[in-house]
Amino acid sequence: MLRELIQSRMDSQLKIYNRQGQAIPDTQIKDEYQKIRQYLLDFHTAPISSIAINQTKDYRYLLTMLASMEIGIPYVPMKADYPIDRITQIQEDSHFQLLISDSKMEEILTYEGRNKLTLPVAEKTDDVYTIFTSGSTGRPKGVIIQREALENFFQFMGEQFQHLSSEERLLQCTEFNFDLSVQDIALFLTRNVAVYFSDFGNNIFKLAFEIETHRISVIDTVPNNLNMFLTDMIADRMDYKCLKYLNIGGARFSYGLYQKCLKYFTPNIEIFNFYGPTEATVYSHYKKLTFNEADDCFETNVTIGKTVPHVQAIIVQDQQILGANERGELCIGGIQVMKEYCNNPVQTEKVFMEIAGVKYYRSGDLAFKNENGNFFIVGRADDTIKYRGYRIDLLDIDSYICRLPYVQDSVTIALPNENTENQTIGFLILKEKKTVKEIKEDLANLLLEYQIPEKILFLDKYPTNSSGKVCRKTLKAQYLESLEKA
């Protein structure tokens, strides 16, 4: 299915635009694709196990991934600015034998090629890509995804968004080393949408400019970008009429963000809340938000909906499957679950469990399922802390803080403390000036005394990682550094 899908797409008219918004000629794209494909085919006859890609994010990066998928060569996506130490770590684990950089691509595009070769047989259980995520130890973990998992996700995306026409314009704003970008590829292949490569570089004003200038109708992005996007400073001055489909995933869709969408977006915009760890092939759950709170929310938790076809999900505690409205760890099984962590059998064994003969991935997310079969994420096991003997969830606290009308966003962290077990610190981005005393007085109407952060600090923006997610590790490090300097 994957091979036929790519071949069919490459035989059709392609609408791809570079980061400057210039259309790439259809003939140029197809000619370059054939050269990349031929180069990889010729080298696939040699003992090549996989390739790594660390080109600049543009249409040639996309073509390299598509050629790899079609031929059946596993690939490892990386950013062009990865330091040599990280590339070395990834090579040690994945054993890739060919690194395709910008300079290597220039060489490939001059390659003449040998005689036409027959495509090798591609099995459903073959590896298709390995994405390296940040590990808790600091060493990246390689998530190996198999061909059948990706095919199932592509089929789901094609069916779920079958109403999208080839006239839609998608802004590709995610780095290819982040699996959210696979959703962009899915819509490009299955719905024939036009693709505009973004150059916003975490500058939210640039992102708003690109949406307006190119009349973008489809965006796949993380909640943090949408949160910044909907600040009063931007939202009140921007024309959103071109937007039709917003697909949000990669992190928790907060209740505060839900309220912002209610304020700024018309009912004509379809907003999907997607959920899924990298280990479950991009997304395992999805929900088209109705913005009827009774349907979308439970207290301050926004639903992640139901599972993608051929994916199973259960709520577990102490190896027992829980019933409706009982809270435990969300575990995911089925066709989209990863094969394993690359060169890391110990960690692989830790994250898998078997119940009733079915293999499940332990997500580490605390969740419940309601009577209607909709799932809700209520926190993470590592975000649940003890404070003065009480058990509190940091994400839950943030959800309540964001209910204050003058709070744009909130991130609460915890640091070990001998007296209280943990010290809680809330980092707030405000819409209007408030004192810490005023905020704590207002929070007293929403939270119990021990749930209110001990310290409240103000920021203009949060540090983010390469995927655009808020980086809590950096936030902690910056705070500790500020204490040392004080």
Image (cartoon, grey):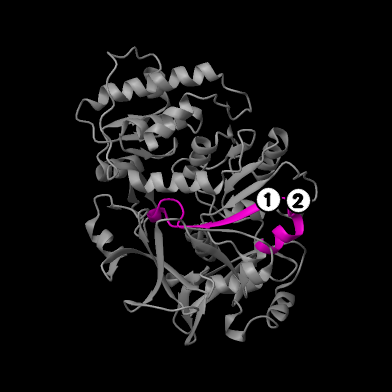
Please state which of residues 14 and 385 is positioned toward the viewer in this rendering.
14
Q: Quadrant of residue 399?
A: bottom right
**Which of the 4 image quadrants contains residue 61?**
top left
Name the residue at 50% across, 64% down: 480
- Residue named by callout 2: 235
Q: In this rendering, would 97 be left or right of 244?
A: left
Q: Which mark is residue 207?
A: none
Tag 1, which secondary structure?
helix
Which residue is rendered at x = 57% and y = 41% of the image?
173
Residue in the picture at 28% in, 71% down = 356
The answer for how far apart the CA atoms under marks 1 and 2 are is 7 Å
In this picture, which residue range is highlighted in magenta? 258-284
Q: How many neighbours does mark 1 have within 10 angstroms: few (below 14), some (14-19), or many (20 or more)?
A: some
From the viewer's side, name the closer residue of 178 and 408: 178
| Residue found farthest to the right | 237
Residues at circles 1 and 2 in contact by the CB criterion of under 8 Å: yes
Disc 1 designates what residue? Answer: 229
Quadrant of the frame with the C terminus: bottom right
| For residue 329, above or below residue 248 | below
**Along the line of sight, the residue nearer the viewer: 459 or 358:** 358
Is residue 97 one of those drawn in magenta? no
Image height of 275 relative to 457, above or below = above
- Residue 93 place in picture, x, y as percent: 26, 46
Q: Badge 2, how many Cα within 10 Å: few under 14, some, many 20+?
A: some
Image quadrant holding the N terminus, namely top left
Q: Amino acid under label 2?
A: Ala
As for residue 275 lying within the magenta part, the answer is yes
Residue located farthest toward the left when viewing the structure as drawn: 47
